[in-house]
Image (spheres, grey):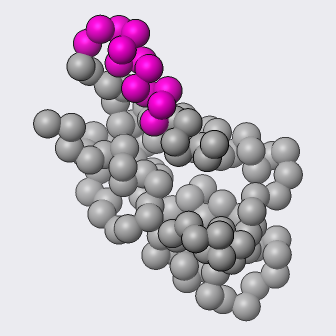
Amino acid sequence: MDDDRWLEQLADMTDVATGTPERAPARLKAKIYSALVNEQSETGPLLSLAATKAAGNGLCVFEQTIASLPVGERIGSMNPCSICHARILAERVDHAPIFWPHCPYVGFHRSRE
């Protein structure tokens, strides 16, 4: 099961467990996602961006740029979210103004109304 789906299921279970329609704040979800990806990268290299794209997964605009550059495996397997301004906004601002496709942080900040 991929991490995004697992996090969505975890959030859904939390809503059911509390009996309220409230969800965890988007900022908290963004921080948890960042922490999980950082921990995963500490245990070994992440799947390269080229391999991620080849597997049919979308890349955000910044990941796509890095994937199209002639860079080595080390750079291609880094986590560009760790230096992206979208992550910083997502972790610190409610309803962060980030809209580009395939950014993992966008889904956390979609309107819940």
**Quarter that holds the N terminus:** top right
Location of residue 85 with respect to 107 vertically, above or below: below
Q: Looking at the picture, how far across and down is residue 71, in whole percent?
A: 75, 85
Q: Looking at the picture, how far across and down is residue 82, in whole percent?
A: 60, 56
**Magenta stretch holds residue 104:** no
Q: Looking at the picture, how far across and down is residue 28, in whole percent?
A: 43, 31
Which residue shows up at 24% across the image and 19% down it?
21
**Magenta residues: mostly which secondary structure?**
helix
Which of the pair 45/16 is nearer the observer? 16
Which residue shows up at 44% across the image and 61% down it?
103
Q: Quadrant of residue 106?
A: bottom left
Location of residue 6 with respect to 23 vertically, above or below: below
- Residue 49 seen in render: no
Residue 41 left/right relative to 1: right
Residue 55 left/right relative to 19: right
Which residue shows up at 49% across the image and 27% down it?
10
Which residue shows up at 36% across the image and 14% down it?
16
**Magenta stretch holds residue 19:** yes
Q: Quadrant of residue 70?
A: bottom right
The part of the chain drawn in magenta is 8-20
Q: Quadrant of residue 43?
A: top right
**Quarter that holds the C terminus:** top left
- Residue 93 seen in render: yes
